[in-house]
Image (cartoon, rainbow, N blue to C red):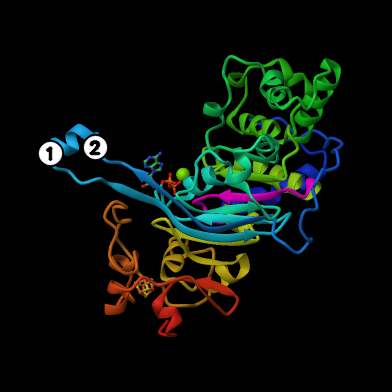
Amino acid sequence: MKSIEKAMALHARRSQGPSPEPAQEEPPAETAMVEPQVSEPLVTEAAPLVRATDLAKTFDVSAPWLNRVLERQPRLLLRAVDGVSFDIARGETLALVGESGCGKSTVARLLVGLYEPTRGGFEFYGQDAHAAFKTPQGRHLRRRIQMIFQDPYASLNPRWIVEDIIAEPLREHAIETDPEALHARVDDLLRSVGLSPQDRVKYPHQFSGGQRQRISIARALATQPEFLVCDEPTSALDVSVQAQVLNIMKDLQRERGLTYLFISHNLAVVRHVSDQVGVMYLGRLVELAPKHSLFDSPRHPYTRMLLDAIPKMHDTGRARTPVSGEVPNPLNPPAGCAFNPRCPHANDRCRKERPVLQSIGGVRVACHAVQEDRI
Ligand SMILES: Nc1ncnc2c1ncn2[C@@H]1O[C@H](COP(=O)(O)OP(=O)(O)O)[C@@H](O)[C@H]1O
Ligand code: SF4
Ligand SMILES: [Mg+2]
């Protein structure tokens, strides 16, 4: 865990000076000239760029109808995301963390319009995004919200050269039709992620994992988005390469005023990139706090458990909370607080009544014990 932070600092220093990069990766080229962002001032500066309200997605995972009828099986509904609300200010990063299966990727897919919410929704610049996705202007909105996936190899067409991969969204949205200008645009995008314009004619398999993720980032940036949804963008990369990609993402955020939803299960990465952190458990947010509050004084027992799993990162002298067990089956979640089977502070109320997210001392926590001031 510590090594990634060291690697990030090292990379940040290296990218300021002329010293060489590790052999595996190309050195980042000079940052390209960045075109100014086109934004629509539909709301005041203070309003968040993204506001999710009671966002929910339920999947029907029932057996086929005939089997259900013959075997008298009930319909099975899986609540992957169940009432998630958050704001992200322009230019800031909200990180979502939580164990596998807690609904992080489903939130990501809801925010880029790949899924329709079962309940709730989200506003982008104060406008209902899912309503907008369905209108002719939805195309314009899709340009402004882009996604970066975990596995760059799977998300890049292996039969296309890099130029075509990056130019595709520019052609699709008819942003650039002139071949010369398209060429120049691709070169700028490659430079902005530390690749060379000569890489234009290569295929994805000719690059390392980190370079492929840079190509994905360049492609995502092609439409000049304002909001990037990044689903475990560096989890498939090794530590030193992760650091390079994360630093490039941070630089691009600063230069272009980008807003990120950043999903990761790696708290060292989250600590490095986020402004706010949302901790998810079984489809719900259990704690939402500014980064420093969350790392310095985690409130929810689940947040504490996640931080306790990385002993050296926060040494507050606080007694460790031993928690064991597995994430419950989302098809059959526990009554009351979903975390109660694993929680050392659970009592009768916890087993019966589901806690709701409440503001306490500048953070939002869904826990009876915290709300009752027992822990
Ligand atoms: N398309 C889908 N159909 C049915 N169940 C799904 C689908 N996508 C995700 N799920 C389920 O929803 C829950 C949350 O999944 P996901 O959002 O991928 O979590 P995470 O990204 O945190 O690992 C899991 O139980 C997963 O099995
Ligand atoms: S509500 Fe109860 S079971 Fe849930 S996290 Fe808080 S103390 Fe633990
Ligand atoms: Mg996921």
Whether residue 352 is visible, yes or no, is yes
Relative to 137, residue 363 above or below? below
Give the residue drawn at x 62%, y 62%.
Answer: 276
Q: Which residue is mark 2?
A: 63
Magenta residues span 256-268
The residue type indicated by label 2 comes to: Ala
Q: Residue at x 82, y 43 (%)?
A: 38
Q: Which quarter of the frame holds ligand 2?
A: bottom left
Distance in Å between CA atoms under marks 2 and 1: 10 Å
Give the residue at mark 1: 71
Report the residue at 23% width, 35% height from top: 65
Mark 2 and mark 1 lie on one chain; the one further toward the N terminus is: 2
Instruction: Name the one closer to the observer, 236 or 263.
Output: 263
Quadrant for residue 228, please give it: top right
The location of residue 218, given as percent across then percent down, is 70, 32
Where is residue 224 drawn, in percent x and y? Answer: 75, 37
Residue at far left of view: 71
Q: Residues within 10 Å of mark 2 (few under 14, many from 20)?
A: some
Q: Nearer the viewer, residue 306 or 371?
A: 371
Q: Is residue 263 magenta?
A: yes
Residues at badges 2 and 1 in contact (C-beta under 8 Å)? yes
Query: What residue sits 30% from the left and 78% below the top?
Result: 349
> Residue 158 at what x, y percent from top left?
57, 18
Is residue 297 depicted above or below 63 in this figure?
A: below
x, y (%) of residue 310? Answer: 47, 60
Query: In the image, is residue 30 above or below residue 290?
Result: above
Question: Residue flagged by tag 1: what amino acid is it?
Answer: Glu
